[in-house]
Image (spheres, grey):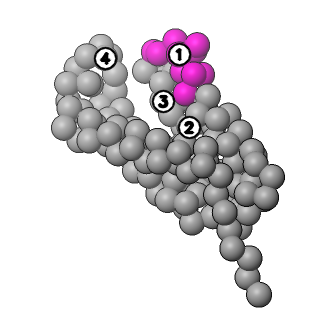
C-alpha cells in the first residue's frame, strides 16, 4: 500500500518561484549573455556558458524536487556553491556572493515546515 504524498503550500510556492526564476535566468543568459559579459570588465569568456549550465541544472533539480527526489535538493546545493565560486572568481564581493546561498536556507526551511505534509521526510 502506497501513501499519498502531500506538499505544503509554501513548498509548492517556493518550487514554482525557483522554476520561474531559473527559466527567466536562462532566457536572460541566452538572449543577453554577450551584453552581460561586456558589462563585467575582465570577466572570462567561460562565465555565461557556465552560468547557463548552472541555471539549466537548477531547473532539472527543481523538477526532481517536484517529483520527491532528495537528490534534487543536493543538486540545488551544489549549483549554488558553484555559483558562489563563479561569482567570487569574477570579482563580485563576498557579501553579495554569499547572498546566493540564502535560497538554500529558504528551500531547506520550506521542506521542513508542516506536520503531516513536511516535504523533507517525504523525499525519496
SS class, disc 1: helix
Mark 4 or 2, closer to the camera: 2
Q: Single out the mark in the foreground, 4 or 1.
A: 1
| Cα distance in 3D space between marks 3 and 2 | 10 Å
Position of residue 36 relative to residue 5, above or below, is above
Q: Is residue 25 left or right of residue 121?
A: left
Q: Which residue is at the front of the view, 64 or 89?
A: 64
**Helix, strand or loop at mark 2:** helix
For label 4, the crowd category at 10 Å Cα-Cα, with few meaning under 14, some 14 to 19 and many 20 or more, is few
* Crowding at mark 2 (Cα within 10 Å: few <14, some 14-19, many 20+): many
- Please give the residue where the numbered disc 4 appears in the rendered image: 40
Magenta stretch encompasses residue 51? no
| Quarter of the image with the C terminus in it | bottom right
The spot of residue 121 in percent (x, y) is 78, 59
Label of residue 96 in the image: 1
Dot 4 lies on which element? loop
Question: From where the camera sits, is residue 59 visible?
Answer: yes
Q: Which residue is mark 2?
A: 80
Label for residue 33?
Answer: none
Where in the figure is residue 35, as x and y percent of width and height?
19, 24
Q: Which residues are magenta?
A: 91-100
Which circle's residue, 3 or 2, is located before the other in the chain?
A: 2
Measure the C-alpha gap from mark 4 to mark 2.
20 Å
On the picture, is 35 further left or further right than 21? Answer: left
Distance between the Cα atoms at labels 1 and 2? 13 Å
**SS for callout 3:** helix
Q: Choose top left, top right, bottom left or bottom right for residue 78.
A: top right
Q: Residue tagged by mark 3?
A: 86
Q: Is residue 96 above or below residue 63?
A: above
Image x and y of residue 11, in percent: 61, 48
Residue found at x 50% / y 33%: 83
Amino acid at each position: 500500500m502506497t501513501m499519498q504524498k502531500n506538499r505544503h503550500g509554501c513548498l509548492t510556492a517556493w518550487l514554482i518561484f525557483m522554476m520561474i526564476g531559473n527559466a527567466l535566468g536562462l532566457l536572460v543568459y541566452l538572449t543577453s549573455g554577450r551584453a552581460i559579459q561586456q558589462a563585467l570588465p575582465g570577466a572570462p569568456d567561460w562565465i555565461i556558458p557556465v552560468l547557463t549550465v548552472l541555471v539549466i541544472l537548477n531547473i532539472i533539480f527543481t523538477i526532481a524536487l517536484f517529483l520527491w527526489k532528495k537528490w534534487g535538493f543536493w543538486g540545488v546545493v551544489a549549483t549554488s556553491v558553484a555559483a558562489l565560486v563563479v561569482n567570487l572568481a569574477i570579482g563580485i564581493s563576498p557579501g553579495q556572493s554569499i547572498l546566493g546561498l540564502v535560497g538554500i536556507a529558504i528551500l531547506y526551511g520550506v521542506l521542513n515546515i508542516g506536520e503531516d505534509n513536511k516535504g523533507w521526510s517525504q523525499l525519496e
